[in-house]
Image (cartoon, rainbow, N blue to C red):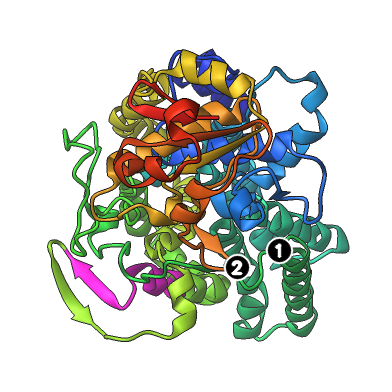
Amino acid sequence: MALALGVALVAWIFPAEFLFPAAGEAFRPVGDAAQHVIAQRYLIADAWRWPPTFAANLNTQEGGLNTAFADSIPLLALVLKALRGWLPEGFHGIGLFYGLAWALQPVAAVWALRGADERRLLPAIGVSLAAVSMPAFIGRFGHAALSGHFLILVGLGFYFRLVVEPTRGLWIGAALLQVAALLVHPYLALMTLALLAAVPATRLLRGERFLPEALGVAGIVALVAAVMAAFGYLGAEGDGGYGMFAMNLLSPLWPSGSALLGWPWAPQLDATGHGGWEGYNWLGLGVIAAIVAGTLLRPGAAAEAMFRAHPGLTLAAIALSILAASHRVGFGGAIILDLGEVPSFLEQFRASGRFFWPVGYALLIGAMILLARSFAPLVLVAGLIQFADAATLRGELSRWAAQHPAWTVEAPKLRAALAEARSLTILPSWPCIDKATGDATYAQLLEVLLLASERGVPASTMYAARWHEPPRCRDRELAAAPFAPGELRVILPAAQAALAPLVPGSDTRCAPIGELLACR
């Protein structure tokens, strides 16, 4: 029934062309989704290499790109790469991953609930409805990999089972979960790892045997580190900025997007000046009602669960909440605490507000268990309230998935030029764009890359969230270089005045394609 619910919601929310895209469309993905599509298409089109996530045909002026740093969802992309001979030209799995995430979310919630030894039908239906209606899950549209919240729920399910009877099969499953989460997105892997680390912590605090469980977690950490090393994750750096995208302390209770309360989805609560979206963690009216009702009906059981039955999970939730709030703690519209400099390793967690997600799911499962122990139909009631409260957010997601923004570049002409090209140089390169004023240029560059990615034409530049070597700006050198055989050199409007005169034979080799200048 949980799977049927998930599949039905996929069919309801996502258009077929969103789930199963192809080349030649008259519309384009936008924002972060465009970046993810480009990275995954290039990885699918390129030859098999080591590390498997590396694409030598993208960002060629820097020697290629580890597409994991552009959120290509390697777990799915590598499967699609193995099947590429049967896929239509230009296919990518970004939309498909949303479908998988939505189908698996309620199933994973039932797995977590059963791990806590609640197996009745009504609680299972209630938790399915609530889990698929978690606002932080629905609100991730635009970032496919981070919609994989089902992995967090699977992690909770492993926690509940391992803390009771840690069998070899469960540890193997937990290890596979960690690798899968890493190959979807490293943030999700850190979250599931925190849940697994709560297993030995709980057993220790309960005065039980914990050393084998601690060794099990250490082994999984070693496995994840080995996979990270093999796939080229280690040693990468990003822009930093821990605390910029933190969770506001009021965010779990601030009803942005609540349909039942009539609260608008945007703007989100923000004290840091960066929009509040990354720290969006409204729990939903159904979950809050379940927490309040469950605690009032069984106050002793609630305290027992937090401090005696699952103290390690409670500590993990506190630690994750602190990490989510960051060193610049926002309360409403104000920063109420600023601790100044932070350790450099925290700079890797720029979007720290995401780390509250496991806490939200632990509260969901815990509240539903308390209700189920009191009166099982109450779990279904809470799930229905949560589902109704999320109607606004589902509508926003559906509208986003159905949007068909037109190309701002002349797509048909550029597609024709790319069909004859053996390589593509785009000027300005990504690191050369003025970050303060370059939004339009960034968007145009992504459009050109989107069109090139339909055929996997090797392209000179690309945005990545992290890198091993900081990207260099050498546009004047690239513009003045002799043409390679079959090279198409596209100059965006912002760089034409400075770079077009440097192109060898620009008077005869260059011609406009709309606002772009195409030289060959």
Residue that mark 2 sits on? 468
Please tell me in which quadrant of the rendered image residue 58 appears.
Answer: top right
Q: Nearer the viewer, residue 148 or 250?
A: 148
Q: Is residue 363 left or right of residue 85?
A: left
Please say if the residues under marks 2 and 1 sit with CB atoms less than 8 Å apart: yes
Is 486 on the left-hand or right-hand side of 431?
right
Looking at the rendering, the stretch of residues picked out in magenta corresponds to 318-331
The quadrant of the rendering that contains the C terminus is top right
Asked if residue 377 shows in the view, the reply is: no
Along the viewing direction, whichever of 285 and 498 lies nearer the viewer: 498
| Residue 41 drawn above or below residue 224 | above
Residue 327 included in the magenta stretch of the image: yes
Residue at label 1? 232
Say which quarter of the image contains residue 224. Answer: bottom right
The three-letter code of the residue at mark 1 reads Gly
Residue shown at the point (22%, 48%) measured from the top left? 268
The residue located at (19%, 60%) in the rendering is 273
Position of 411 relative to 242 (above/below): above
